[in-house]
Structures are given as C-alpha cells and as structure tokens.
C-alpha cells in the first residue's frame, strides 16, 4: 500500500509512505535544493538509504554526507534532519516493526498507533 505523495510543510520535499510486511517505508524526493526535513527524532532505530543523489544528514549536531547507494542507521531518539546537495535526491527511510503488515490497512492510511510510534512527540 502506498500513500499518495504529499509535502509536510511549505519548504518540504515530496514524501510517500508504503507499508511492507514488518516495515513502514518513507520515501523522500527532493526536487529543489531549498527543501529539507525539519529536525525530528523517532522512538526506534531506522535505516536511511540514499537511492539517488547526495544529501547531508544532521544527527545530533554532527553532519554526515550520504551518497547514492550509502545507508546510515539513525538510533532511536537521535534528532536528525536531511538537506539535499543535488537534485534530484531520493532518500528511503525504513522503520521496522514486526507487527506491521499491509493487510492491517483499511485503505485510508497508516493506523494511528503506528504513526504515534513513527515520530517522537515534541513538547509544547
């Protein structure tokens, strides 16, 4: 199941979400250099794979360059963001959970309990 492409904020990349057995996969497509992800963290580790292009990943204040074909594991609760160095750049983030399965989807999107686990809450 793939959710339609969307932008999460005005200066955001394109994103799409797919469900595979055991994983939520978020694909980010950067088509302008000014696009970026906002600094955020997740409640679990996830793998970032650079499918196309090159990007900088800020990870708890340290900047890492990710080139095409390279991957990086972002540890749980580590603040991170992504900025493309070239366009197009496509990054795939794989969030694994053994209980995720496409058959549990009703066609309207990812169940809220999965979304709640996908990104850490930011205190108000």
Image (cartoon, grey):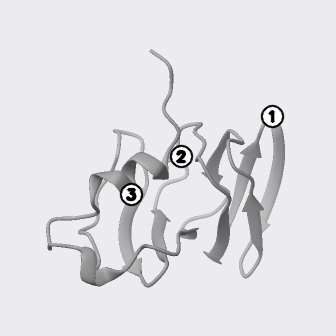
Image coordinates of residue 53 in percent, x first then y, are 64, 72
Label 1 belongs to which residue? 61
Q: Which residue is drawn at 77% across and 66% down?
A: 72
Q: What element carries label 2?
A: loop
Image coordinates of residue 39 in percent, x first then y, are 59, 36
Compare residues 96 and 54 and report the one nearer the observer: 96
Label 2 belongs to which residue? 36
Other-residue count near label 2 (Cα within 10 Å), few / some / many at <14 / 14–19 / ≥20 = many
What is the total number of numbered labels drawn onto the structure image? Answer: 3
Q: Residue at x 66, y 73 (%)?
A: 49
Other-residue count near label 3 (Cα within 10 Å), few / some / many at <14 / 14–19 / ≥20 = few
Label 3 belongs to which residue? 114
Q: In the image, is residue 54 above or below residue 62? A: below
Quarter of the image that includes the C terminus: top left
Q: Distance between the residues labelled 2 and 3?
A: 23 Å
Q: What element carries label 1?
A: loop
Where, by quadrant of the figure, is residue 50 drawn? bottom right
Compare residues 50 and 18 and report the one nearer the observer: 18
Image coordinates of residue 92 in percent, x first then y, are 56, 71
Quarter of the image that includes the N terminus: bottom left
Q: Residue at x 73, y 53 (%)?
A: 56
Looking at the image, tell me whether mark 3 or mark 1 is earlier in sequence order.
1
Q: Which residue is drawn at 36% across and 67% down?
A: 16
Left or right: 121, with 111 as reference point? right
């Amino acid at each position: 199941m793939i959710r339609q492409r969307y932008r999460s904020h005005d200066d955001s990349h394109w994103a799409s979400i797919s469900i595979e057995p055991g994983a939520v996969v978020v694909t980010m497509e950067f088509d302008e250099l000014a696009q970026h992800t906002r600094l955020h963290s997740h409640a679990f580790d996830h793998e970032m794979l650079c499918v196309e292009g090159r990007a900088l990943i800020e990870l708890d204040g340290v900047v890492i360059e990710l080139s095409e074909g390279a991957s990086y594991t972002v540890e749980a609760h580590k603040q991170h963001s992504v900025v493309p160095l070239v366009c197009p750049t496509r990054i795939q983030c794989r969030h694994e959970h053994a209980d995720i399965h496409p058959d549990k989807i009703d066609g309207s999107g990812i169940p809220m309990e999965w979304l709640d686990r996908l990104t850490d809450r930011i205190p108000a």
